[in-house]
């Protein structure tokens, strides 16, 4: 894979192979030269047919990754910067490994995936700067080390052997800045000390070590062409000095392990070498020698010193002369034989992307792992070979293999495609396998028992480059399959097109870098994206949310203005183009926590409460569900403040936005009190001149639990419009699976929703508990998770009971399963059953209290004049 474009690759795939005994070959210099002649004499095409056979029983199957590609958490828990963290922030580069696959936070998910693959070994690399943030032992980071201890421990638990790479291109930035990185011979001893620590910390559980991955790319493209980190170029001799230091660093680490750790740990150690394959342009001895020289300049550069005589290939010496550093006799002996196996990398990246034409010496590159293995076996006297990396880079953004034309490839040995005119193929439609979605809809339908399921699409992932003509077809297929499975399980999908989050914009990169929602072109792009989703998913989706909770206080008024236009455009696209055939509904969902006057009898607090609701909810609701303009109170308040921030709708925009709804969708979690008096500067909103408060008697977790606030919110405005509560839930300790607070919360909030429907006449159509599991928002889920095990919380069964009974049956009705609420006060039932007794008791109590007060004050007054 293309390792320097980390976030856009599939990730590196590796297959570790055990000892390969490929056929006899003489162990003499240039023995690999006979490879091309041997294969040219094999019967064709008989030799190319598929071979039905098996590998030996001790053959090793594996998969692997590299730290920078997958770990993420680039500044988490004390990790220092690496040269890749710096390199990916330079120039026009937009892809980084800041998040990667987020393996740092998902060890258990990675372990589960590895176990499902059934491999026996897992190769991963250590991040040098996560263990030693500045590159040296003095900066040791315990938390980073513990991450790898945990990973290795979990691998051993599932009986998978770790194969650990000490250095996979990500040198600590401090070593690059202060010493010049691998161009400085001092790094030999620094690397040896780093290796010493790793052998000591992890060696008891690690039997396979890779010191350095692909030193050719590190030297040639890190310090020569500048294609990979650290991006140094313009010194044509520097790569060879860097390669010299890499070999000596590897040898120093090997001898350290051999002398101090091998007797006890019994492990094996090597350097991972990468190579292309090359074939002669002509069947002449000169062409074969050029092929041999090409391999010597890439693979032999490092392999010959390790596996043969401790020096560089004669071909390199002849062509590079004094540019190539020299080993002393002592250094040759130090380097020679410092590999316990031949670790080989081979794939499309090196063959077609990281090999310069000058290193092909006029010959033709090719992908032929079999011939490369035979050459290595012959050239280096049958070493044990492990293919530690083999994969194919795939760009996942554009649609691939969509060209219907037919081509001939390489017919003239020039690597070109020749189109056959007059021929084409029809697209192949393959049935998608949906088995991997079975778990979630089983949870949704069978265990929870709901009939609707709400989830959000990822705009930036579906249309990464912003052009809907080139969507991510793989992700579209995922959503298509998932919605179909939900429908088959009698669950109605409710799909959000864009889910607002404060952490990231979730907009395609071109929009994200062009002022996001402040860009007047973003609404039209959103409408085009909506059209794509309606077209591809509308057959199974009958409820759409355009924007989820856009009314965030961090959103500017101008951004909100463009969001409203985007929603309206998307609504009209559906109304005009898709509603006649799909028959669905579209709206937007607003966050609507209730705001209550701190002193409801005080007009001074009633007005601030109305003002807050206008600014937080009416801001988006009134243009859509009301007048087509922002709330009157909102405009008048800003006018008093001499603020011109609130945009003005053109008449055409009013007409565009007003009435663009089929239902009112709201998220509700809590209630707060407001007063006009300033008491605490931290909770005072200057612009609205309101003080936010809570009632100290309310249950907190961490926000107040106030069930009656939901009923008031439902009654606020637009109560005749069909209303859906799209999210309602409470945060509780994720480790508390007997989540009594969530049971209380759901029971009481749903009961208040029932009151709004039954007693107040609110047109309430549905209720969505938030959330299904703890993965997105820890502590909110009906399902918890311990490692890879999914845990059903107590609240789930209570919620399911409410669903099964469609609410709260009258007491005494059969099959009442919902927990009964405790009485408000002990003894109150006496007053209820005996109203006369209750009345007389209250009167008597009042008389006694009055007499007591009279006697008290009479005695007090008497003492004052005594």
Image (spheres, grey):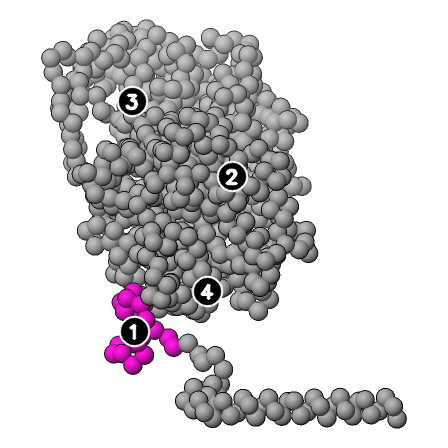
State the residue at coordinates (38%, 29%). Answer: 652
Read off the residue under disc 2: 555
Splitting the image into 4 quarters, where does residue 458 fall? top left
Q: Position of residue 253 (x, y in %)?
A: 55, 35
Q: CA distance from mark 2 to mark 1?
A: 43 Å
| Residue farthest toward the left in the current orientation of the protein | 422
Which residue is nearer to you in this view: 121 or 402?
A: 402
**Neighbours of disc 3 within 10 Å: few (<14), some (14-19), many (20+):** some
Read off the residue under disc 1: 809
**Neighbours of disc 1 within 10 Å: few (<14), some (14-19), many (20+):** some
Q: Earlier in the sequence, mark 3 or mark 4?
A: 3
State if disc 4 and disc 3 touch (CB < 8 Å): no
Q: Is residue 429 left or right of residue 673?
A: left
State the residue at coordinates (60%, 61%). Answer: 602
State if disc 1 and disc 3 touch (CB < 8 Å): no
Q: Secondary structure at mark 4?
A: helix
Read off the residue under disc 4: 708
Read off the residue under disc 3: 367
Q: Secondary structure at mark 1?
A: loop
State the residue at coordinates (53%, 62%). Answer: 704
Q: Earlier in the sequence, mark 4 or mark 2?
A: 2
Q: CA distance from mark 3 to mark 4?
A: 69 Å
């Amino acid at each position: 894979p293309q390792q320097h474009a980390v976030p856009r690759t599939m990730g590196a795939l590796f297959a570790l192979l055990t000892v390969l005994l490929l056929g006899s070959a003489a162990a003499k210099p240039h023995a690999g030269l006979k490879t091309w002649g041997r294969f040219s004499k094999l019967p064709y095409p008989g030799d190319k047919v598929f071979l039905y056979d098996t590998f030996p029983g001790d053959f090793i199957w594996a998969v692997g990754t590299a730290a920078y590609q997958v770990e993420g958490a680039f500044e988490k828990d004390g990790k220092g910067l690496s040269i890749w963290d710096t390199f990916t922030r330079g120039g026009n580069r937009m892809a980084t490994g800041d998040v990667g696959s987020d393996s740092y936070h998902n060890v258990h998910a990675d372990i589960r995936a590895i176990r499902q693959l059934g491999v026996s070994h897992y190769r991963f690399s250590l991040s040098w700067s996560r263990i030693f943030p500045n590159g040296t032992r003095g900066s040791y980071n315990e938390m980073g080390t513990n991450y790898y201890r945990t990973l290795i421990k979990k691998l051993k638990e599932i009986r998978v052997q770790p194969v650990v790479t000490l250095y996979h291109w990500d040198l600590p930035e401090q070593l690059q800045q202060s010493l010049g990185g691998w161009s400085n011979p001092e790094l030999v001893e620094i690397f040896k000390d780093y290796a010493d620590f790793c052998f000591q910390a992890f060696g008891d559980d690690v039997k396979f070590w890779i010191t350095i991955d692909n030193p050719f790319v590190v030297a040639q493209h890190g310090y020569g062409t500048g294609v990979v980190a650290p991006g140094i170029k313009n010194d044509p001799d520097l790569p060879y000095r860097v390669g010299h230091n890499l070999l000596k660093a590897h040898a120093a680490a090997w001898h350290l392990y051999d002398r101090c750790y091998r007797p006890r740990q019994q492990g094996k150690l090597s350097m991972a070498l990468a190579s292309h394959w090359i074939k002669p342009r002509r069947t002449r001895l000169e062409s074969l020698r050029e092929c041999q020289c090409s391999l010597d300049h890439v693979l032999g550069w490092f392999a010959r010193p390790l596996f043969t005589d401790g020096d560089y290939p004669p071909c390199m010496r002849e062509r590079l002369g004094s540019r190539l550093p020299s080993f002393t006799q002592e250094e040759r002996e130090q380097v020679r034989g410092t590999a316990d196996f031949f670790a080989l990398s081979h794939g499309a990246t090196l063959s077609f992307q990281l090999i310069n034409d000058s290193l092909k010496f006029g010959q033709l590159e090719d992908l032929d792992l079999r011939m490369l293995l035979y050459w290595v076996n012959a050239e280096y006297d049958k070493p044990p070979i492990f293919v530690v990396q083999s994969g194919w880079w795939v760009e996942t953004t554009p649609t691939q293999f969509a060209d219907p034309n037919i081509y001939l490839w390489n017919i003239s040995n020039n690597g070109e495609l020749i189109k056959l005119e007059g021929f084409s193929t029809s697209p192949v439609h393959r049935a998608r396998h949906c088995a991997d979605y079975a778990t979630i809809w089983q949870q949704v339908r069978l265990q929870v028992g709901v009939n609707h399921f709400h989830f959000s699409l990822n705009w930036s992932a579906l249309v990464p480059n912003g052009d809907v003509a080139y969507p991510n077809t793989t992700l579209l297929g995922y959503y298509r399959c998932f919605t179909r499975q939900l429908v088959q399980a009698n669950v109605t999908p409710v799909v959000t097109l864009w889910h607002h989050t404060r952490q990231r914009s979730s907009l395609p990169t071109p929009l994200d870098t062009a002022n996001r929602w402040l860009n007047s072109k973003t609404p039209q792009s959103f409408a085009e994206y909506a059209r794509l989703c309606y077209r591809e998913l509308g057959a199974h989706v009958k409820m759409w949310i355009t924007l989820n909770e856009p009314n965030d206080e961090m959103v500017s008024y101008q951004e909100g203005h463009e969001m409203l236009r985007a929603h309206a455009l998307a609504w009209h696209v559906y109304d005009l183009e898709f509603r006649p055939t799909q028959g669905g509904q579209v709206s937007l969902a607003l966050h609507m926590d209730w705001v209550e006057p701190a002193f409801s009898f005080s007009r001074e607090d009633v007005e601030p409460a109305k003002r807050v609701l206008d600014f937080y909810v009416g801001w988006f609701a009134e243009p859509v569900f009301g007048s087509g303009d922002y709330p009157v109170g909102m405009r008048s308040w800003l006018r008093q403040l001499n603020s011109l921030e609130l945009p003005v709708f053109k008449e055409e925009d009013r007409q565009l936005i007003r009435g663009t709804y089929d239902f009112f969708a709201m998220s509700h979690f809590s209630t707060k009190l407001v007063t006009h008096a300033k008491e605490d500067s931290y909770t005072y909103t200057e612009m609205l001149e309101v003080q936010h408060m809570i009632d100290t008697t309310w249950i907190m977790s961490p926000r107040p639990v106030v069930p009656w606030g939901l009923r008031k919110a439902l009654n606020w405005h637009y109560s005749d419009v069909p209303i859906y509560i799209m999210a309602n839930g409470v945060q509780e300790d994720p480790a508390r699976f007997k989540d009594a607070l969530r049971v209380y919360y759901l029971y009481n909030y749903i009961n208040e929703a029932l009151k709004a429907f039954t007693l107040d006449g609110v047109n309430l159509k549905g209720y969505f508990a938030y959330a299904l599991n703890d993965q997105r928002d820890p502590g909110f889920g009906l399902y918890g998770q311990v490692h890879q095990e999914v845990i059903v919380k107590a609240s789930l069964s209570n919620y399911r009971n409410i669903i099964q009974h469609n609410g709260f049956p009258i007491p005494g009705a059969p099959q009442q399963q919902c927990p009964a609420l405790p009485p408000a006060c002990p003894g109150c039932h006496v007053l209820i059953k005996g109203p006369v007794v209750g009345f007389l008791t209250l009167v008597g109590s009042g008389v006694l209290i009055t007499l007591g007060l009279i006697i008290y004050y009479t005695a007090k007054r008497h003492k004052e004049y005594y």
